[in-house]
Amino acid sequence: REALAMDPQQRLLLEVAWEALEHAGVAADRLAGSRTGVFVGITTNDYQLLSATAALEEQDAYAATGNGHCFPPGRLSYVLGLEGPSMAVDTACSSSLVAVHLACQSLRSGESSLALAGGVNLILSRLTTRLIAQLQALSPDGRCKTFDSRANGFVRGEGCGLVVLKRLSDALSDGDRVLALIRGSAVNQDGRSTGLTAPNFLAQQAMLRQALQSARVSPAEVGYIETHGTGTTLGDP
């Protein structure tokens, strides 16, 4: 009964978390009682929308624990016995990266000794897609043409991604395989700009400068850039 009521996003998160720990060479069954933090970017609740159509007598307590945004990270911490911070992060498109930022902050402050950070998204209901389409944000032809004069919207996607984060000194001391180093990160908000959902390039510039300062890296040292390009005339500039 509990599994049936559980949002597939929760199920996917549990699977990918285990895979991420295996890939990092961390024994998941040895993390119980550790200060391991869980930071999960999650925005949609399509399964809850679908479940809401069921008759009231068919609903039970598992419908609550299976769908609320607070439960995916909480369930992961519960299953593995993790005692560090455990939180869901919803900042729309930036949820996963903000989750990683918060995980880095937690590690640097000593709040966590290890962190699982990332995000999950599944498209299970046409309602959310329809509402976004009404904002004229989705590409009618289903192709995202970022930084192109033909740009006419973005395309929604599904998936789950998690990274296992650790302080570099601890990783080297433990003989871990280090794949990448996060030198710095930054988060801000547009404040009062042209619209609630409209990006503000001045705020984006300020955030990039803050991230570079945090990483102690000059712009000239950056050799590769990966962006959240919406493929819209409003967002790309």
Image (spheres, rainbow, N blue to C red):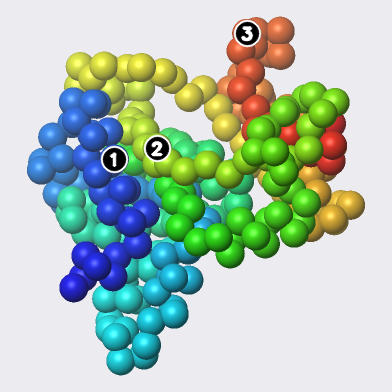
Amino acid marked by disc 1? Val
Mark 2 residue element: strand
- Residue 196: image tag: none
Residue 77 image offset from top left, x and y in percent: 25, 55
Extreme residue toward the bottom, this view:
57
Residue visible at 52% across and 42% down in the picture: 157
Residue visible at 44% across and 70% down in the picture: 50
Label 2, label 1: how far apart the Cα atoms are:
7 Å
Extreme residue toward the right, this view:
194
Residue 193 or residue 227, whichever sits in front = 227
Q: Which residue is mark 3?
A: 223
**CB within 8 Å, label 2 to label 1:** yes
- Residue 16: image tag: 1
Residue 15 image offset from top left, x and y in percent: 24, 44
Is 149 on the left-hand or right-hand side of 176? Answer: right
Label 3 crowding class (10 Å Cα cut-off): few <14, some 14-19, many 20+? few
In the rendered structure, which disc, 2 or 1, sits on the residue that comes first in sequence? 1
**CB within 8 Å, label 1 to label 3:** no
Amino acid marked by disc 2? Gly
Label 2, label 3: how far apart the Cα atoms are:
24 Å
Q: Which residue is mark 2?
A: 161
